[in-house]
Amino acid sequence: MGRAKLPRKSTIIDMTAMCDVAFLLLSFFILTTKFKPAEAITVTTPNSVAAKVAPDKNFVLITIDKDGKVFLSMDDKQKKETIANTLNTTKNLGLDVKAFAAADFIGAPLAGLKSFLAIPSDQRKGAALPGIPAKDSTNNEMTTWMRLVSDAYMGQTAPAYLVKGDNAAKYPAFKGVVDAFKKNDILKFQMVTNPQNVPQGSELYKSVMKGEKRSD
Amino acid sequence: MAEMDTSSGGGHKKGPGVKKGKKLSTRVDLTPMVDLGFLLITFFIFTTTMSQPTAMRLFLPKDADKPEDQNKAKQSGVITLLLGKDNNVFYYEGELTNNGSNFKSSNFKEIRNVLLDKKSRTPEKDLVIILKPSSECTYRNVVDILDEMTIDVLKRYALVDITDVEEKLVVASEKAGAATASN
């Protein structure tokens, strides 16, 4: 009796289809990746367990670098023009409104603002700039800036105030910024951090495990 | 049965002078290419999700100039944390005694136990944590200690300016701590 002969099948699979899928996904991810723009101010942010993602629209960002120098940036160009016009009328600084609106960040005392704007934007690097004076409580220019910002947003939804500080920045710079907020009745702000896992066994960890909603 | 290679010998089937070109397969093994593709995909997936910064919220109290407007806290429920340089943390419960006997030193790892201990001993409505960063501590320390409040689910805390006495005490304790460490 002869057994039924099983046809011998090849173990080689056609990889073409899989290759197609792989590269389709690859091109998708390459195209959607937003690369971090080379930042003029290098800041390494601290870690926190905060889970909320930092807003990327309608924000006012205050950066504190490792030497405690303070920089201001905001994403709304119209508001920047308003601020520049106000500065020109109230303080007679003679600023170029267009250049002010185009600047990625502001990092000079009011007196040196005109020469700051004269520097080509690709040469404005945080390390070489003076920053906005904030440490000295008698001459805290951040207060002026925050007043200008909150005036520019008057009657509209308030922007998200973000503070992005460097790990090594000393406390007085941060205090100067917080004081400037307080003086202008800006009592809510957010600090930009890197995400970090909740330590196991801590109180927060237990409440998260129980499914309680986090308040932050 | 064993077969013999007869192709070289005769050329009986085809006429003389007709050569048969060897047929090469056009198939390429795509496995390494797929491997590479997926490797790059994983790389891009990881790099895109990692660079999302988060934001920690902080609500400031309004400055109250008049003493009667200020928030009162029960002395028994208060613990004050002082942040020094080099990640040092000092704390005292209640009010600082004149000789500084209740002034204790700690660090960021141990402070969690101190806070949890205080939390378990104090009724929830009385517990207030006062954070006093000195001028020598870093922004990171401030964020870390605020984060610690979130981790330990402490609802009432305040960021307060340090007094001169406390600042001096922090510096003195740090010096003393450095002296004992070097011995």
Image (tube, coloured by chain):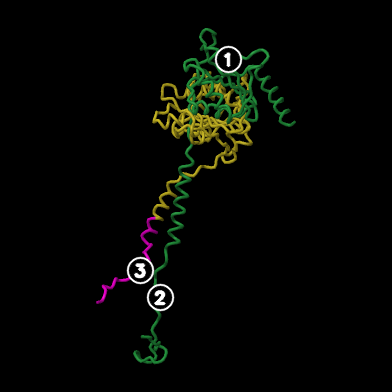
Chain colours: A yellow, B green
Image mark for residue A10 = 3
Residue B23 seen in render = yes
Q: Residues within 10 Å of mark 1 (few under 14, many from 20)?
A: some
B11, B64: nearer the viewer: B11
Q: Earlier in the sequence, mark 1 or mark 2?
A: 2
Callout 1 secondary element = loop
**Left or right: B77 as drawn, with respect to B5:** right
Pointer 2 with pointer 3, Cβ within 8 A:
no
| Residues marked 1 and 2, same chain | yes
Give the residue number, with chain letter if any, for mark 2: B24
Up/down of B34 relative to B71, above or below: below
Q: What is the chain letter for disc 1?
A: B
Callout 2 secondary element = loop
- Residue A22 placement (x, y as % from top left): 40, 55
Pointer 1 with pointer 3, Cβ within 8 A:
no
- Residue B12 placement (x, y as % from top left): 35, 92
Alpha carbon of mark 1 to alpha carbon of mark 3: how far? 80 Å
Main secondary structure type of the part rendered in magenta: loop
Up/down of A22 relative to B122, above or below: below
- Residue A175 placement (x, y as % from top left): 58, 23
Check disc 3 and give the amino acid type: Ser
Q: Residues within 10 Å of mark 2 (few under 14, many from 20)?
A: few
Quadrant hosting residue A5 = bottom left
Task: Please state the extent of the stretch shown in magenta in the rendering.
Answer: A1-21
Image mark for residue B94 = 1
Callout 3 secondary element = loop
| Residues marked 2 and 3, same chain | no
Check disc 2 and give the amino acid type: Leu
Alpha carbon of mark 2 to alpha carbon of mark 3: how far? 18 Å
Q: Look at 46% across and 31% down and name the residue there.
A: A205
Q: What is the chain letter for disc 3?
A: A
